[in-house]
Image (cartoon, grey):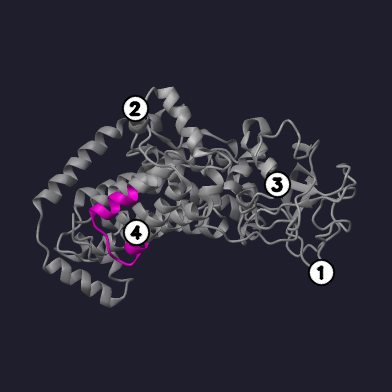
Amino acid sequence: MTMNNSYWLTRFLILRLLGLVYAVAFLAAINQIIPLIGANGLLPVGLFLERVTGALGSRGASFLRLPSLFWFAHSDTALLTTAWIGFLLSLIVVAGFANAPMLGILWFLYMSFVNVGQDWYGYGWEIQLLETGFLAIFLCPLLDPRPFPKRAPPMPVIILFRWLIFRIMFGAGLIKLRGDEVWRNGTALYYHFETQPLPGPLSRWFHFLPRILLRMGVWFNWLAELVAPLFVFWPRIARHIAGSVIVLLQVILILSGNLSFLNWLTIVPALACFDDGFWAKLLPRALVRHAQAASARAEPSRPMLVTAWTVTAVIALLSIQPVLNMLSPQQIMNTSFDPLNLVNTYGAFGSVGRERLNVVFEGTTDDIPTDSATWKAYPYKGLPTDPDKLPPQIAPYHLRFDWQMWFAAMSTPDEYPWTLTLVSKLLHNDPGALSLFAANPFPDKPPRYIRAILYRYSFAPPGSPSHPGNPGSPSHPDHPGNPNHPDHPGHHYWTRQRIGAPWFPAMAADDPRLKPQ
C-alpha cells in the first residue's frame, strides 16, 4: 500500500489534536464546574438531577435518557475528580498514547458533564466533541496504545470522519443560507467580528478591513461550507483541496475571535480528508519513517474491521434524522437525536447581531444607590467591560459564564433566573461566584448594593485615544469619578452607551427578590 492510500499519519494527527481539545475541555471543567453546577453553584447539579428524576419517574429511566456518572455521585469532590481524570487521560493521548478503552473512558467522562451541565453545556461543540470522540474510539486498536501500533486505521472509520465534517460544514452553510439576510447579501462580516460572543485581540482589525474584503470573506465562507463539503468523498486531489479550504476557514476563525474550542475541534474530522502521502510532504522525516515502518509490519485484524463496519452501519441508520433535518426548510441546528449524541445536526451563526449588548454588574458601598453613587464594575474575563482594554485571547479555552452572559444581554433576567443567585452571592463576596470574574472590586468587604447595567458596545477606530467616558455615567470604567480610572494615556478599543433602565435594579443583600445563600 502506498502512502497515498494509507492513514497512519492521519490517525496520529487526529488523535493528538482530539486529545488537546479534550484536555482544554476538562481543564475548563476543573476551573469552573464547582461555581457553575457544584453544591453551592449557580445551577446546582443535585437540584437538576432531582427535577429530571421527578419528570421521568425513576433514576434508572433518567440515566438511560441522560447517561452520566453523576447519577451515582455528584458531590463537588466527585465533579472535580472526574474532571481531573479526564484531563490527565487527555494529556496521555496528546503525548501519543491511545487505545479504544482510553478513548471510551474520555468519551463517557465528558458525556457525564454534558448531560448534567444544563445552560453551561448547551453549546453545539459539546455534542460535536462527543460525536468526534465516539468515532475516535474505533480508530485505534483495542489495547495497543502506541502512536504507531500494528493495526492500520480502519478505512470505514476514516470515511465516518469525512461524513462528520460534511455534516458540520454543510449544515452550517444551509442554516446561514436559510437564515439571516446579511449572509445572502454578503454583509454578514460588517457585523460579525464586533458582535460575536467573545472578540479576540485581532477582531477589531478584522472589523475595520475594507468592505470589499469583508464581502470576499462571506464568499469564502460559502465556498468552505457549501462547496468544499461536496468534495470530501472525491478522489485525493479534490479531497485535499476541499480539506484545505475547510481547515483554512477554521484558522481564520481562530485568528478573528474566541469561539471556544469549536474551530480546533472542527479541524479534527477535516484531517481525514488527507492521506499519508499528503502529510509526508509536511511532517518531520523521522515521523514519516515511523509511519512507513508501521505500515510495513502491519497485521490485519478481522475483529477490528468487523467492529468498524458495524459502527458504520449504526451511524448510517442514526444519520437518517440529521439528514432529513438538514434538508428541511425548518432546519434546526446543534441538536442531538439520540441519548448518546452519536449522530447530531450542526450549524453556527445562522443569524448575526447588528449591535453588541453587554450586561455589566456593578457594585457600590454608598448608602444611596443612585446613578451619582460610586459604582465599580465586576470585570469579565473575556467579555468587554473596560473600553480601554484590548480583548484577550481566550480560545481554545471556554469561559462558560461569559458566553451565557452574552446570550443573557439579548434577553431579560427572567429568562436567566440564576443571575439573581449570582447577585446574591456577589453581595456576600462568595469566592466561587467571584472566581467567574477577572477581579473583585470589593476585596475588603462586600458592596452594599449590586446592579446590572445594559450597554451597547462598538469598536472604536484603531488609534482612538482614551476619553473620560459618557457624560453623566460615573459607572463608566474610565470616568474621572470612578476609582478605576486609568492614570496613564491609553487607546480606546470600545465605545459604549448605556441603554435604558438597569437590566437589574440596585439590590441589597436583604432584598426579598434574591435567593437565600
**What residue is pinned by disc 2?**
61
Comes first in the chain, label 1 or label 3: 3
Whether residue 332 is visible, yes or no, is: no
Task: Determine the secondary structure under disc 3.
Answer: loop
For label 4, the residue is 89
Query: Could you say which is closer to the camera, residue 139 or residue 167?
Result: 139
Image label count = 4
Between the C-alphas of marks 4 and 2, the distance is 30 Å
Mark 1: amino acid:
Pro
Q: In this image, 467 relative to 287: left or right?
A: right
Answer whether labels 1 and 3 touch (C-beta < 8 Å).
no
Up the image or down, 212 lies above or below 423; here it is below
- Tell me where residue 164 appears, x and y as whole percent: 34, 45
Stretch in magenta: 91-107
Q: Amino acid at mark 3?
A: His
Q: Quadrant of residue 6?
A: bottom left
Q: Residue at x 79, y 52 (%)?
A: 376
Residue 106 forms part of the magenta stretch: yes
Give the residue pinned by disc 1. 489
Q: Which SS type dominates the magenta stretch?
A: helix
- As drawn, 233 above or below 393: above
Q: Secondary structure at mark 4?
A: helix
Residue 291, position in %: x, y? 21, 69
Disc 3 and disc 4 in contact, CB within 8 angstroms: no
User: Helix, strand, or loop for circle 2?
Assistant: helix
Q: Is residue 438 above or below residue 430?
A: below
Q: Which amino acid, by three-letter code, is at mark 2?
A: Ala
